[in-house]
Amino acid sequence: MLRELSIKNFAIIDDLSLSLDKGLTILTGETGAGKSILIKAVDLILGARAAADLIRTGKDTAELAALFEVPAGSAAAEAALDLGFDPADGLLIRRIIHKSGRHRVYINDRPATTQALSAINGHLASIAGQHSHQALLKPAYHLLVLDRFGGLEGLRDAVSACYEKLLPLIRELDALNRQMEKQTEHIELLSFQAEEIRRARVECGEDDTLEQERERLRHAERLYATVGRCVESLYGIEGAVAERLAGIGKEIQGLCRIDEALSPLAQRLEGAALEVEDVANELQAYLQGIVFDTERLDEVEQRLNVLEKLKRKYGGSLEAVIAYAQETEGQLERVSRLPEAIERTRVEIGACRKELISLCRKLSRKRRKAAGRLSDKVVQEAASLGMPAIRFDVSFSRIPADEHTDPYLIVDKEGVDATGMDRVAFLISPNVGEDLRPLARIASGGELSRMILALKAILATGDAVETLIFDEVDAGIGGGIAEMVGRKLAALARYHQVICITHLPQIARFGSRHFKIEKSVHRGRTRTTIIPVDGEARIRELARMLGGVRITKQSLAHAREMMRQKA
């Protein structure tokens, strides 16, 4: 329920605040006083697109704010909680419009997006005006009205959930089939590559090891000759390096009796002689291991050629070749599992589609039963609103299927979607002798306004929207019919907070609260104000509405009589 409304620097509104309550609130005023601006402000709070030209002349920003009381567990409360806003103490919605075009939205003083605003406010309030009946003219809305009237939301949600479960399965099957087609063409190449690498038995670092072996085999003679000479020089000939180092060490050792400082050097020479001897022994062992094998050299060369070919084809290194082989094996394994995955997905689709068809047919049967009851109810409500000759019918059709429709979403040669298998349209004949026609072809704005009111009244107890705002619901009507509309609005206000802008006193007199919107000039600027009217002030406002600018005794008496009749 809308508790507080505040508007600053918006069009001709300077600074306006309005406190509201439950029941039927009436807003009246002269043409051009600012009633439509007030509705525009509320529309912006509900998420409509903002424009900088709405800012009051001379100001840089306009600020609109509304405080909503939100019942726990309501659709609005759930939507707010889902977006992270706690509605326990109400929802304060603020929109700040900047001349720069950088507009801001706040919910409970936290920055928010217009998408979040629309998601919440769609459950808080709705505006029904003479020029905002587009929803009622759309068949998609007709289907929603029918389902709400018939209490079929749960079944409709089940259809939607099943449909949303089926769609990704269909997409998955399509992707699997495309993959199967693509991989079937590629599978021969993958198998060849995997087998080529598998047959080569590649090991990491194998190429480095083989290259070293190849160098040893290529230069075996040089290695043998050079190492052999070195062994002789170090240890094998008279006067070899090891022998000479040992001799030098003994000479220095003999001098240690003269100077003890030479002892460490003598020890190092002794150690060097032993180290040279060890090196000579190891070189001798290396010499014995040198292989002169041209056949082995050919084998190594051939193996390296195989490895180089693989590296050029599959990544530049043996690590990359091994990784490519693993990926190829994985692809082949996945391809081998594709038929199983395709079959499993088909089974899931079949079960889900069977459930969807069953739910759709059940929903369709219930809709057709509900349509008859709705037609009778609309005729009854319309008669109470001064349309006694009206005929109303709900026309059913099916969702067309074409060559682009997925076969899994076709039932009995027709399509299905998240709402089921039906399309409906409300048909009306307002006058005797006229054919039933779609609502969109009704010429009279007054008839359309009353149809909205009739539907709102029918759906009143189950409508999730807390606040209903009617702008010019009195368009094209007057006299006794206006009184019927007023009574209907008062009855609707038992279930919702209803705010109604009207020019007709026959409607205004039914309000539990009444506000007058006035336009005046203050210090050279036009501004709009809103004041509550009660008692004698309300009588005078009704008299003005009855008789125009000049209020007469007769119009005052008539106004008093209208209020007495209400009581």
Image (cartoon, rainbow, N blue to C red):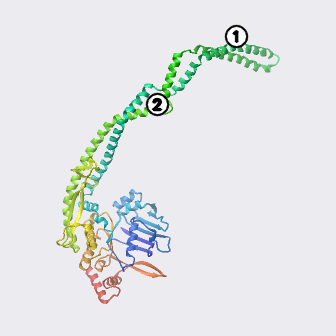
* Quarter of the figure with residue 475: bottom left
Residue at screen point 32% across, 78% down: 503
User: Within 10 angstroms of label 2, few (less than 14), some, or many (20 or more) residues?
Assistant: many
Q: Amino acid at mark 1?
A: Ile
Label 1 and label 2: CA atoms lie apart by 52 Å
Would you place residue 484 above or below residue 411 in this image?
below
Q: Which residue is the site of mark 1?
A: 237
Please tell me how many numbered marks the rendered image carries: 2
Q: Is residue 243 left or right of residue 286?
A: right
* Label 2: element kind: helix
Where's the C terminus, which quadrant? Answer: bottom left
Q: Position of residue 109 (x, y in %)?
A: 46, 63
Q: Which sits in the foreground, 313 or 541?
A: 313
Q: Which mark is residue 322?
A: 2
Q: Position of residue 478 (x, y in %)?
A: 26, 79
Residue at screen point 23% across, 79% down: 480
Q: Which sits in the foreground, 516 or 264?
A: 516
Task: Determine the residue located farthest toward the top in the rendered image.
Answer: 238
Q: Which mark is residue 425?
A: none
Residue at screen point 51% across, 16% down: 295
Q: Which sits in the foreground, 401 or 470?
A: 401
Q: Position of residue 560 (x, y in %)?
A: 29, 84
